[in-house]
């Protein structure tokens, strides 16, 4: 698998304990009590937003509450371990992302076995990323970023929601393909990283297009490029990284 294709390998989906797929959990009266959806990421990020969107519609359709339980930390390991150790009765679901795919090789000694302890239920969403800079940094285009990074190796930094997360891997992919050196600043969750890029405490950040769109429109951050194969329908005036100076770059979550 080519590295530019890596982020296409794992769309967000819901998972549950493998042993929960048999009766009585999936009888016709399921669910007959509230269902917990563990989101192993902080509130406000794409996984949280998508989970809440789905939870409300499941609640409306099935007549029982689907309740979000955010358990961020450890690059999704903390929340995922909690879900893996929950009763295998179908009443604990897990919002997963391609972070889990990365962690399979990044974190070898996890307290759970992803492919044994969980079964995929349904794909939910995928999104392009957008690379943004704080307006005070004087970086208005990807060309500005590449020029500055090449002139001052290691001076620029970029925020992410933690090691192994899509935002981290997108930054590392950019560093590798553009042959630049930037410092990774990991956070416990994307909301903290997002707060600091808006506040100017960090220079750059990759974030999901739907999550960052309003901040771009408000002028709180500057959109440099998006990560898809083609321009985003939401940000049609923003070039892709591939067309703006890093040919072949492609990453989605």
Image (cartoon, rainbow, N blue to C red):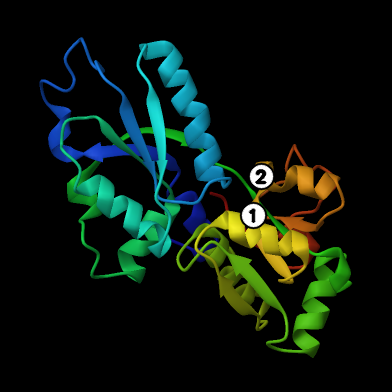
In this picture, residue 252 sits left or right of residue 149: left
Residue 242 position (above or below residue 13): below
In this picture, residue 152 sits left or right of residue 127: right
Label 1: state its secondary structure: strand
Closer to the camera in the image, 251 or 56: 56
Specify the label residue 246 is tagged with. Answer: none
Q: Position of residue 235 (x, y in %)?
A: 78, 43
Q: Residue at x 25, y 64 (%)?
A: 110
Specify the label residue 211 is tagged with. Answer: 2
**Considering the image in quadrants, where does the N terminus appear?**
bottom left
Q: Which residue is mark 1?
A: 207
Rate crowding at label 1 as few (under 14), some (14 to 19) or many (20 or more) other CA atoms within 10 Å: many
Q: Position of residue 253 (x, y in %)?
A: 53, 49
Real-space CA distance between mark 1 and mark 2, rounded to the nearest whole angstrom: 7 Å
Residue 48 position (above or below residue 60): below
Circles 1 and 2, Cβ within 8 Å, touching? The answer is: yes
Q: Residue at x 42, y 20 (%)?
A: 58
């Amino acid at each position: 698998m080519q590295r530019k294709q890596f982020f296409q390998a794992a769309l967000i989906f819901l998972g549950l304990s493998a042993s929960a797929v048999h009766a009585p959990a999936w009888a016709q009266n399921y669910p007959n009590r509230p269902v917990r959806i563990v989101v192993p990421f902080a509130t406000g990020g794409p996984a949280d937003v998508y989970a809440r969107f789905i939870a409300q519609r499941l609640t409306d359709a099935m007549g029982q509450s689907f309740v979000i339980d955010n358990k961020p930390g450890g690059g999704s390991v903390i929340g995922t371990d909690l879900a893996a150790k929950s009763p295998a009765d179908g009443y604990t679901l897990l919002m997963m992302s391609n972070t889990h795919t990365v962690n399979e090789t990044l974190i070898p000694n996890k307290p759970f076995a992803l492919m044994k302890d969980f079964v995929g239920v349904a794909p939910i969403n995928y999104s392009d990323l957008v690379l943004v800079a704080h307006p005070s940094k004087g970086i208005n285009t990807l060309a500005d970023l590449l020029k500055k990074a090449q002139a001052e190796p290691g001076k620029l930094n970029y925020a992410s929601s933690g090691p192994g997360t899509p935002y981290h891997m997108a930054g590392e992919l950019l560093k590798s393909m553009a042959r630049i050196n930037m410092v990774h600043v990991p956070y416990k969750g994307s909301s903290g990283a997002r707060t600091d890029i808006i506040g100017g405490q960090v220079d750059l950040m990759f974030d999901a297009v739907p999550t960052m769109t309003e901040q771009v429109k408000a002028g709180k951050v500057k959109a440099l490029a998006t990560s898809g194969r083609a321009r985003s329908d939401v940000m049609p005036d923003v070039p892709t990284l591939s067309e703006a100076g890093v040919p072949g770059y492609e990453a989605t979550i």
